[in-house]
Image: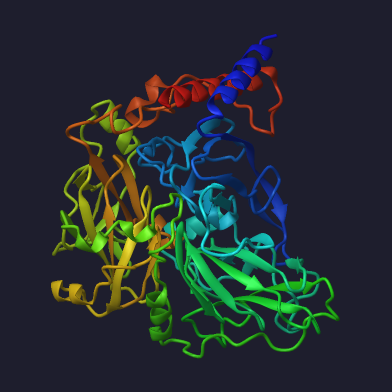
Amino acid sequence: MAAVVPLLAVAFLAATAHAADPFAFFDWDVTYMTASPLGVPQQVIAINKQFPGPVMNVTTNYNVVVNVLNSLDEPLLITWDGIQHRKNCWQDGVLGTTCPIPPGWNWTYNFQVKDQIGSFFYFPSLGMQRAAGGFGGITVNNRAVISVPFDTPDGDITLFIGDWYKKNHTHLRNMLDDGKELGMPDGVLMNGKGPYRYNDSLVPDGIEYETIKVEPGKTYRFRVHNVGVSTSLNFRIQNHNLALVETEGSYTMKQNFTNLDIHVGQSYSFLVTMDQNASSDYYIVASPRFVNESLWTRVTGVAILQYSNSKGKASGPLPDPPNDEYDKTFSMNQARSIRMNVSTGAARPNPQGSFHYGSINVSQVYKLRNEPPVIINGKKRTTLSGISYSPPDTPLRLADLYDKKGVYTLDFPTMPIDGPPVIRTSVINSTYKNFLEIVFQNNDTTVQTYHIDGYAFWVVGMDYGEWSENSRGTYNKWDGVSRCTTQVFPGAWTAVMLSLDSPGFWNVRTENLDTWYLGQETYIRVVDPDGGYNVTEMVAPDNMLYCGLLKDKQKAQKPHGSSRSSASAAKLNNYLLLVLVSLVALVLGH
């Protein structure tokens, strides 16, 4: 009977809350499994024995409850790239806000996709784990009462592209710890599978490849995510136009591309119409950019688009990539051409352009400069503005909550510092409702992509050279695309603006896993001096994990990973009670 009472309570609360915002429940077991995406057996990270993980299909304002069982042999956090967790950084799944889930333990995430639509993805945020998998899609659909600026597609397809190594993530991590480069990837995967054998000398026999089956004459929405380690990829579908309509939660002006560069951590959705004669199957290609193509030829992802009336297998050469192997001007011009559709609504009916970001006075300006890796205290590190971030044992937000001093400093410089680089837990200090301008300056030799948790920002400008105040004369102050991850080309800058309307600690990082692991990140501390905790920010969850200076507050949890016995009645009761507490908090919040 112990399990029945929570079930009845959960059913009752879910029913009473349904009139407001619905709930979506997910129960995940994160494990290792063996896969051979490039023909060689290797250890990957799976969710419920799926690699990649399942797609979360929800709708604007849904309350999302995800119970995560960590059956790995190391700590785990899941972060939700692009989900804003409004006023609720506790659920963000990064070390600055949350203690990791120990091996064999479970923890329940509980958040709302408040006022959001679009294409996003989740992934494990610790120690290069994304290089082994653990990622999956997040599709946030419009509510039925909100119109969409294009006809309803006949189908919805999620596609994960990304560079891939045959070495497991712990090996890659050890290489970085030893000061080594990761080197050229072994391939590019599509939905966790290797390339179609388009060339017998480049692709070995027996590799499983992805096939996407379609009907002639129909239009499909492709949601494409670059979940790789560090490689920018050019995406294209043979003989088909890609009509770009959305990027990371923002509807764009619809425009056709024959190919588009998708950088690490970025997400786009396209409408693709099946308007060809199906004389054969068609190639879907993701090939690396800004590399020596003669050396990187084998590092190409190839899937198959198959019409139901196809007359044969795909053959012949792949569709050509852009012809500027090293010239990044083409790619930058592509990025500049992507504009927000200011006349349509998104999660709400009011037009996306109704927030006039270009006319708001900027409260703070930060220039974050990336340099090539450096040696600090005998170790290879990466930096932002001369500072290599060192994650403390105690999450920043927990340290604030319990008034633990000395965990971090609020001295991140507004401009890059002179002098030798340092390792420090330095944080950007800001205030609720400030309006920030952040300039990412990339003085390294490779493309870096930068992401800010908790927010969408407007990409207002990018150009080559060193940013100066005069650069503001080139800013787009009307229809710059709103997104959460932007590319910064080598020897160039990208400027973004964002409104700090969500208190908490929010991670600013490169999405390139190697440079992120080596220290290229910081946090923005957003404090509301008038409202504060439990007024403009949600309270800490009852199931909070404790670590670092607060480890003595943590109650023991008997390890119950899937390698042990995860089906016990005790685990079920604990999970149901956790859900019950979460539901009560959310219902009372309405």
Locate the C terminus by quadrant. top left
Rendering coords of residue 568 (x, y %): 70, 21
Residue 135 seen by the camera: no
Task: Residue at 59%, 55% (x, y): give it.
Answer: 132
User: Which one is in front, 137 or 589?
Assistant: 589
Task: Residue at 65%, 18% (x, y): give it.
Answer: 7
Residue 360 seen by the camera: yes
Picture quadrant where residue 439 is located: bottom left
Rendering coords of residue 264 (x, y %): 47, 65
Rendering coords of residue 51 (x, y %): 67, 53
Picture quadrant where residue 104 is located: top right
* Residue 309 in the image: above or below residue 520: below
Rendering coords of residue 149 (x, y %): 51, 63
Task: Residue at 45%, 68% (x, y): give it.
Answer: 181
Task: Residue at 62%, 64% (x, y): give it.
Answer: 221
Locate the N terminus by quadrant. top right
* Residue 262 in the image: above or below residue 225: below
Query: Left or right of 352: which side holds 260?
Result: right
Query: Left or right of 453: which side holds 467?
Result: left
